[in-house]
Amino acid sequence: MRVVLQRVKHAQVSIKQESVGKINTGYLLLVGFEDKDGTEQIDYLVHKIVNLRVFEDEKHKMNLNLAKVNGSILSVSQFTLYADTKHGNRPGFTDAGDPKHAKKCYDQFNQKLREAGVIVETGEFGADMQVDLQNDGPVTIIYDTDQL
């Protein structure tokens, strides 16, 4: 499982010029799965993301988590996080999870974030989406459960 997390002032995902998910302060998550991913990887990353302290406290130190700033999450599925670019100029996506499995994992991931008390907006799995954001910092964190 791979997640690219960006701390944002605001973010929005649209399909055919229609907004389907929108947040203010929080995280934009670009989320990808492979076939071996499941509950263990999802639970691990939900815990890491919910508890990540990258918002500034009164001393301007990154010391606050999402809950402390009343932040929310915009979660966008992105199979291209598993692009293989080693050979040639056209990426391969054979490492990306089977769409049925990946959608199940994506839905479970978002539900577990909600169960952790986070407001979660989403894109639409498998859709052609446009993402607009204002990265704050910029702060970008990359999670890859294969590197545990």
Image (cartoon, grey):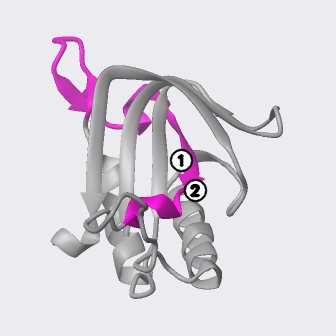
Q: Residue at x 34, y 63 (%)?
A: 45
Q: How packed is label 2: few (under 14 Cα within 10 Å), some, or many (20 or more)?
A: some
User: Which quadrant is home to the C terminus?
Assistant: bottom left
Discs 2, 1 touching: Cβ within 8 Å: yes
Label 2 sits on residue: 114
In the image, which residues are magenta?
A: 54-83
The vertical placement of 65 against 42, above or below, is above
Q: Residue at x 51, y 64 (%)?
A: 79
Question: What separation in Å lies between label 2 and label 1 (alpha carbons)?
Answer: 5 Å
Residue 12: give x, y in percent of width and height: 64, 32
Q: How packed is label 1: few (under 14 Cα within 10 Å), some, or many (20 or more)?
A: some
Residue 118 tag number: 1
The vertical placement of 36 against 24, above or below, is below
Between 70 and 14, the one lying in front of the other is 14
Between 41 and 125, the one lying in front of the other is 125
Is residue 46 shown to the viewer in this render?
A: no
Between 118 and 137, the one lying in front of the other is 137
Residue 37: give x, y in percent of width and height: 41, 82
The residue under label 2 is which amino acid type?
Arg
Residue 129: give x, y in percent of width and height: 68, 45
Is residue 15 shown to the viewer in this render?
A: yes
Q: Is residue 7 left or right of residue 31?
A: left
Q: Residue at x 34, y 68 (%)?
A: 84
Q: Is residue 35 left or right of residue 105?
A: left
